[in-house]
Amino acid sequence: MKPTPCLRFALWAALCGLPLCAPSALRAERIPALAAISKAMPEATRAPFVLRMHTLEGELAAFKAAAAAFNAKSANDQSDADYDALQSERARYIQEARKFNDELGAAEGAFTIDRMNALAGRLGWDSGKKAQLADALKALHSDGDPNATDIQIRSAWQQVLARRQDQALAGEASGGDGLGFPGAGTQTTHEDCAVFALANAAGLPYGVVASRAGELIREGDWHDAGDRTNPQALIEQKGLNGGEVVMLTESFGQAQVVQSSNFPETLKQGRPILVNVIPPDGDLDAGHEVVLTRTFQHQGETWYVMMDSNQGSQQRLFLSQKELGTMLQENGVAYRPDKGSTVKLLGGGASL
């Protein structure tokens, strides 16, 4: 039996971003975008990835052309064999693209960690601080539900945002464990959520954290010359990567990478946690940095209070552990001020 025209349409619609008429269970797996290759890496490391990227780009172009030709045929002329061959090629390409992204990410990660540790040495960080940075950078890994779909992520966010005015939850959260403090402001259209997140967690003005982030990027050599010359543009247009969040946090205090299973205990210790989540639009290739400030129990389950710079300095969001796992991308980065120092709150009174 041949696939229905609607299911066949899904093959091409998934590439073109068109609405799918097939049931959600039959929707084609999303084709991942190829990650950009850093120009800052040594040429000997970059060259093989550049070659592989060109090959993959050619394979994707060929597949798109074949898919377009298939979809241009009438239903009677579309054979099962051609359809199966296209689906097989699509699955093969997805596997190769993911492998490319994973291996490129590992290579760039190792390069970035090496360069960040070297910068810590040039900046004169003491041995203890350098060791903490090295440990945290090595510990940062993916976290959350790896099988969460964009639909599930959007649904989780919709539920979280819908309950932001829930006074009953706010009351339960106020009796939970963790810190309460006002935020550093509201994020606009820029990609500087990580700067806001750390400013919120450390109780520092946005400008102080943004300035330090710019200094680290300018003095480091894990970005190309253009980005290092204008770090503010990089921060606002692309945002910070996970390693930069770790190093920036360590520059203001102590950064510890924490697995999601340890979030409640960490918050009970009075340490806010920066977490990288998939944004409300469900874009699996994007990230958004937020801060968990408190944990509490609701109907026998673990819940969290979250500060999101998109929501303003006083607004708090409440989400369950399951909802957090659905949108979570990486381990969290717990912040603690250096021993003997005190976090200076921004004023305006304590807040959830």
Image (cartoon, grey):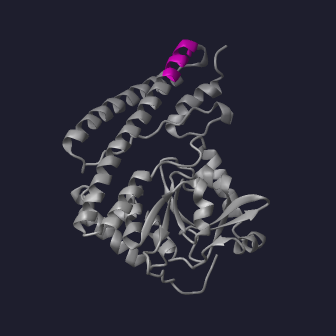
238 drawn magenta: no
Residue at 39% of width from left, 78% of height from top? Answer: 207
Q: Which residues are magenta?
A: 77-88
Magenta portion: prevailing SS class: helix
Residue at 63% of width from left, 24% of height from top? Answer: 5
* Viewer can see residue 351: yes
Within the image, what quadrant is residue 132 found in? bottom left
Q: Is residue 231 above or below residue 77?
A: below
**Does 125 sit left or right of 276 as displayed?**
left
How many marks are shown on the rendered structure? 0
The location of residue 36, given as percent across then percent down, is 34, 45
Residue at 70% of width from left, 59% of height from top? Answer: 302
**Does 174 sit left or right of 49 as displayed?**
right
The location of residue 313, given as percent across then percent down, is 56, 76
**Does 68 sit left or right of 113 as displayed?**
right
Question: From this viewpoint, which residue is outermost toward the left?
Answer: 43
The location of residue 216, given as percent across then percent down, is 30, 66
Query: 212 or 187: nearer the eye?
Result: 212
